[in-house]
Amino acid sequence: MSREEALKFPDKFLWGTATSPTQVEGHIDNEWTNFTAQDGGTCRVACDNYHRYPEDIEWMARLGTNAHRFGIEWSRLQARAFAPLNPTELARYIDMLDRLKAAGITPMVVLHHFSNPPWINASGGWTNPSTVPAYVDFVRQLVAALKERVHLWNTFNEPDTYACVSYLLGGFPPQRKWKLGQFRKVIGHMARAHAQASRIIRRDGNAGRKPEVGIAKNWTFFHAYQGYSLWDRATAFGCHYTFNKFVLDAFLGGWRRRASTFIGLNYYGRVRFHHFNAMIPASGAPGTRLKDFGFICDDMVERYPEGMEKILKYLRRKFRLPVYITEHGAASSDESFRERDLHENLAALHRSIEAGVDVRGFFYWSLLDNFEWQFGYTKKFGLIAVDFADEKLPRRPKPLAGVYERICRENALRPPA
Ligand code: FCB
C-alpha cells in the first residue's frame, strides 16, 4: 500500500512513553522496597532511572516522542503528613522536567501509582480516611511548586487495579485477600481525594497553560468463553460490575464528572472465563492451552484490539470528555507480535477518532523493561531493553522502538509492510 494510505493523527497529537517510579527509579522507600517478586527480583535498583534520567530522556528524544507520562513518588517528598516537600528530591524532579522541556517533551505527571509513603501504609493506607487530606496536601504543595512546568496531571493510576490486587487478590502489598469492604473503602477514599485534588489543580495550577486533570482507568473487558455458561457469564459480569462500573461511577458518576477534564485510559485487552478460570497468562493459564483455545495473548492478557474502539466509543457516549490513552503495550519477546499488536490497537484508535472521539494522545507502556510488580523482571514491556544481569544496566533499543519512532515522527500509522 502506498504512503498516501497512512492513517494521519490529529495535529498536536501527543505520542509518548509511560513509566512509574517504583518500576524504574530504584532507591525508593515505600511498601515495595522489601517486596520480593515471583522471580525473586526486587525494585531496589530497578532501572536506576533515579540516577539515569538524563540518559533515559535522551532515549525518549531518539524515539521522536513529544510526551512522557511518569510518576512523582510521594514517599520521596514527604516524611510525614503535612510536612514541607523535601527540597533535594523536588529539585531532582524539577531538573527532570526541565530536561524534558529542553527535549520538546510534554510531561504528564502521575501523583499516585500503586505506592504510598511508609507512614501512610503504617496507618492503614487508603482504607484510612485520613489519607485523603494528607494526599491532598501533598498535591497542593506539589502543584504550587510545579505549575509553571506541568499542565497535565494524573491524580491516580488505575485505582481499580490497586484496590483489587492489594485487597482482593493479594498480589500487591499489603497482600490482603477477598476484603471487599476494604476494596470499596479504598475506591471511595481515592475518589474523594481525586475530586479535592482536582479542584486544587484547576484553581492553583493555572500558570500559562490551562491545567488538565484526570485519573487513568484500566479498562479490561470481562467475557465468558462460552456464552451459554451461566456461571462464567456471572463471573464476568461480577468483575465488570466491580472493576469497571463501580469504579467509573465512584470517580465520574453524576456531579463527580466535573472533577475531571479528561479520562486517562489504560487499555491492554480482555479476560475470558472458562469454568471459573481467568484464561490469561497472568493468572497462570498455560500458553499452549490458550493457543488451543484460539486465544491471542501477550505474556499477560488476551489481546482484543477491537475493544479499543468499543471502549472509546462507550466513554464518549457516557462522559463526553477528552481521552488520553495513558497506557497500552505488550509484554512479549516476539517483536513481530508486539508490532502487530501496536498496529491493530492504533488502527482501532484511529477509527475511533474518525468517528468523533476526542483522543489527544497515546503513551506506550513502557519506555524501558522494568520491575513489573509481583511478576518482577520477567514481563518485558519496554521499547528499550535493559540488561538487568549487567550491573551497569545498559539500555538497548528493541526493533519495536524503530517502529514506534516512525509513527511518532510521522504522526501517522503506515499500513503494515
Ligand atoms: C498497568 C500498570 C503499569 C504496568 C502495566 C503493565 O496496569 O499501570 O504499572 O504494570 O499495567
Image (spheres, rainbow, N blue to C red):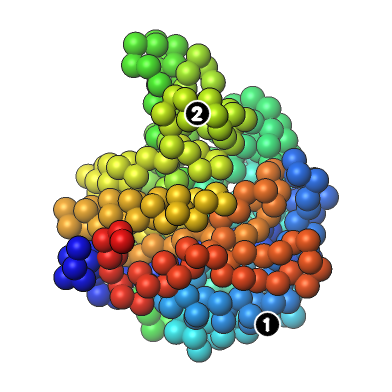
Whether 319 is drawn above or below 16: the answer is: above
Q: Nearer the viewer, mark 1 or mark 2?
A: 2
Where residue 218 appears, x then y in whole percent?
A: 46, 45
Q: CA distance from mark 1 to mark 2?
A: 48 Å
Seen at 65% across and 77% down, the residue is: 53
Amino acid carrying label 2: it is: Leu
| Quadrant of image for the N terminus | bottom left
Seen at 35% across and 56% down, the residue is: 343
Side (left or right) of 53 relative to 416 = right
Q: Which mark is residue 91?
A: 1
Secondary structure found at label 2: helix
For the view shown, which residue lies furthest in the bottom direction? 102
Whether 241 is drawn above or below 355: the answer is: above
Amino acid carrying label 1: it is: Ala
In the image, 315 versus 136, the foreground residue is: 315
Quadrant of the rendered image containing residue 33: bottom right
Where residue 340 appears, x then y in whole percent?
A: 38, 52
Within-10-Å neighbours for mark 2: few <14, some 14–19, many 20+:
some
Identify the residue under disc 2: 290
Whether 216 is drawn above or below 299: the answer is: below
Secondary structure found at label 1: helix
In the image, 132 versus 77, the foreground residue is: 77
Within-10-Å neighbours for mark 1: few <14, some 14–19, many 20+:
few
Side (left or right) of 393 relative to 333 = right
Of pointers 1 and 2, the one earlier in the residue sequence: 1
